[in-house]
Image (spheres, rainbow, N blue to C red):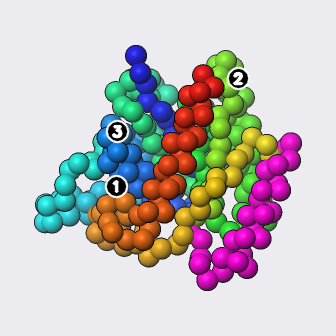
Amino acid sequence: MSRATIVTIAATKGGVGKSTTAINLAVELTLRGNKVLLLDADEQATIDKFLTHRTIAQNELGLSDESDFEYVIQRSNIPKFLRQVITRYDWIIIDTSGKQSEEFVIAGAFSDIILSPTTACFADNGEVEKLLGLLKQINTMREVQGVDDVPCHIFVNKVDTRSFRTVYIPERKEMEALFSTDEFSCIKLMKTYITAYGAYQKMYRTGIAVVETKEKAKAQFQVFVNEILEIKAQLDNED
């Protein structure tokens, strides 16, 4: 029996775009013919606020339901819930709190992939050490279960095009060097970055995901999803 690929989107601080990433990933995977569950384990309830506007858009603008994913708020008993629903979906996307939370560790222990958005100066502000500490907790739990370490992939979000060469490029080189060391080898840096397009803020007013628009941000996010699918394919080949 087939089972869902579980992706946890998590970070050690807020404001890095976790919920925005989770929403657009869920919509894009649904548009590609997958059955998707978006699990909200974040007490900020950002996704719930988006869905309120989405309901209005569907009623007033006739927004197609072809991109509708299923949604549930689940902040306790996450392992039990995942076991109950894992065969019902192709993908389960988990949005966790932007901090070093218990939900992050528990969801990560049951995930196939962890995606961690970050912004510029990540390597300089101690967040990488915090992330590594959480990954060690997660992988200790997985070892007890007889499961391999969870792959963790970081991507740089909210990239400012005005400082692309002066901030992003040097920061990326620093991150590449850091993640090539033995200590941080469990963390991989994704090829794709996400630009700080205004469309990502606009979606919370309209209830329409970026990947459902004709905005420039759509094509870039689809490339990001393609990279996630490549990561999944590599994991499938290893099994």
Instruction: Give the Cα separation between the discs numbered 2 and 1.
Output: 34 Å
Residue sticking out furthest to the right: 182
179 relative to 34 in the view: left or right: right
From the top left corner, tell me how far across and down residue 16 is, in percent. 57, 63
> Which of label 1 and label 3 is nearer to you?
3
Q: Closer to the observer: label 2 or label 1?
A: 2
Q: Residue at the location (83% across, 56% down)?
A: 177
Q: Main secondary structure of the magenta part?
A: helix
Q: Is 216 above or below relative to 225?
A: below
- Identify which residue is drawn at 59% across, 58% down: 192
> Does 78 sit left or right of 30 as displayed?
right
Q: Which of marks 1 and 3 is nearer the N terminus?
A: 3
**Tag 1 secondary structure:** helix
Q: Give the range drawn in magenta.
A: 158-183
Q: At 78% from the left edge and 56% from the top edge, which residue is drawn?
A: 176
* Closer to the eye: label 3 or 2: 3
Quadrant of the image occupied by residue 50? bottom left
Classify 69 as above or below 98: above
The residue beneath circle 3 is 34
Q: Are discs 1 and 3 less than 8 Å apart at CB?
A: no
Judge the density around disc 1: few (<14), some (14-19), many (≥20) Cα neighbours within 10 Å: some
Percent position of residue 41, x then y: 46, 45
Question: What residue is shown with label 2?
Answer: 143
* Badge 2 density bin: few <14, some 14–19, many ≥20, Cα 10 Å: few
Q: Quadrant of the C terminus?
A: top right
Tell me the kind of residue under disc 3. Answer: Asn
Q: Residue under circle 1?
A: 48
The residue type indicated by label 1 comes to Asp
At label 2, the amino acid type is Glu
Looking at the rendered structure, the secondary structure element under dot 3 is loop
